[in-house]
Amino acid sequence: MPQCSPGRSCQGGNFPKVTDVEGNGRDLTSTRPRATENAVNPSTAAPRRFRTDQAQLTITDPRDGSTVGSLDADGADQVRAVVTRAATAFPRWRATPAEERGAALRAAASTLDEHADELAELEQRENGRHREASLGGIRAAVDTLRQYAELGPLHRGRSLRGALGSIDLTRAEPRGIAAVITPWNDPVAVTAGLIGAALVTGNVVISKPSERCPHLGLRLGEILSDCFPLHVLQVLTGAAEVGETLIAAPGVEIVAHVGSTAAGERIARVTALTGAHLIRENGGNDALVVDADVDPRWAASQAAIGAFTNSGQICTAVERIFVHRDLADEFLTALTAEARKRNEEGALAPLVDERMRADVHEQVLASANEGARILEGGDIPDSPGAHYPATVLTDLHPSMPLFSEETFGPVAPVMVVDSFEEGLRRAADDSYGLQATVLTDSMAHAALAVDALPVGTVKVNAVFGGAPGGSAEPRGRSGSGFGYGPELLDEMTTVKVVHVESAVRR
């Protein structure tokens, strides 16, 4: 197994070099990203939004609109070439002992850790995230790779109780080529988790990062691929067309997607025809239900954390708030103050681009036009970049866009309810099923919420609490399968049952 270190390529001496088809595709162990000027140090201005056509991606910094760079998108021939190389690499990687695959993942984690500052800077420039948040995501990625490096070699089948004299067991086997399609809002942590689980169980990976952070996706692929044999990990660049070509390609056995619900549903329709195993964590419209017996200022601080963290650009962000009438006035006053403080301090990072900001603002205005009252924020600042203020609205109704659709921005819409039970009922009335939170001092109400809310994760009295390994399955339009935690190793493998008896000798 090759040993890797920063700046040194580890191509796995026993793996044959496969020549690119007419120079197409990208072997990350031997080439650099195909980028134009300004990919590292922007010095010229550009239109302040994400632009793409099928041939090229152009990225601008959402903080100030300056150019990050442009990358050529891969075409159908390049996708096919990458899949062919992955298929060539799979048998050897599959046969690599599990402890050696784990050692490669540990090396990848250490190498990623050494490149944390570089990747954090690049992430900031592509999605606008604050540096500490970017570094936090990268540290989470390092920890996840190390966890899978230990869990992978321990992932095993079961012995079964068969007839006396026979041997019965199950064994977990890798599925093959995994297409990993990942988002821009926490790109390193999400990508590393899916890649790590796939590789440590013996699959080979083709990663297609979001077209909103392609430079980061390519650089991350460079760093990680150096720690594995040639073509075990490859990266494709492009927008939806590239992802659609990849997931439909013959030989792709796993599709792991974290991203928008619209994209996830299109992917699900394709995999229903190809038979590839699908893992998807998509959008949410997560509810927060506030009971009458909690401190309204504490509840408001929880709501603010849930709605405004990462500028609301998290699939598990709080997007619908149902507050008991008994404390509604105090709660709204405190929540408005939380938002105003963030706005006055300039605490929020920008949204990923102007296209996203326009979508969020349209939902806010449409809801206001239908009767919602804006208590704070709700306007586009007259400054460069894609900034949007922390926004609080009340007098919401379930039919308004801010309640009926997912909102990917720092918006806290509030509906006043007459009872905790009404709050639960309205929270459950939604097509998504990712996560929900309740704030209550009543164990009876907490137990009722756990049973009543049709979501993968229910949190009580902490919007972002949870223990390591607490993997959940999203429901409804939010997706299917375990997208993280130890159970992701099961998703990346398929089970074979083995029965052995003695032969009758001659």
Image: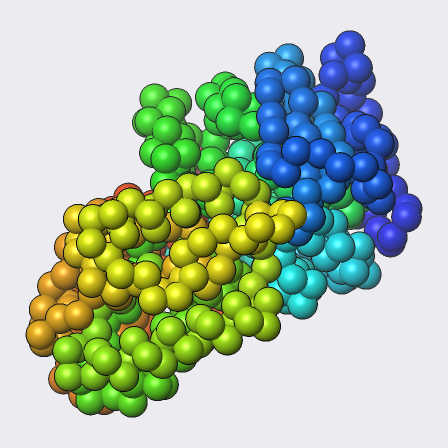
Q: In this rendering, does residue 454 appear at all?
A: no
Tell whether 209 sits left or right of 329.
right
Q: Which quadrant holds residue 307? A: bottom left
Q: Is residue 61 above or below residue 270?
A: below
In the rendering, at what x and y percent does residue 166 appear?
A: 36, 50
Q: Quadrant of the C terminus?
A: top left
Please provide percent x and percent y for residue 464.
43, 72
Q: Residue furthest top?
A: 22
Q: Residue at x 29, y 45 (%)?
A: 366
Q: Is residue 391 left or right of residue 285?
A: right
Above-or-below relation of 81 to 206: above
**428 left or right, relative to 82:** left
Q: Looking at the image, which residue sits at the far right?
A: 8
* Percent coordinates x, y for residue 362 in the rendering: 37, 43
**For this view, does 98 lie left or right of residue 272?**
right
State how many labels appear. 0
Q: Position of residue 407 (x, y in %)?
A: 37, 50
* Residue pictured at 64% horizontal, 13% vertical: 77
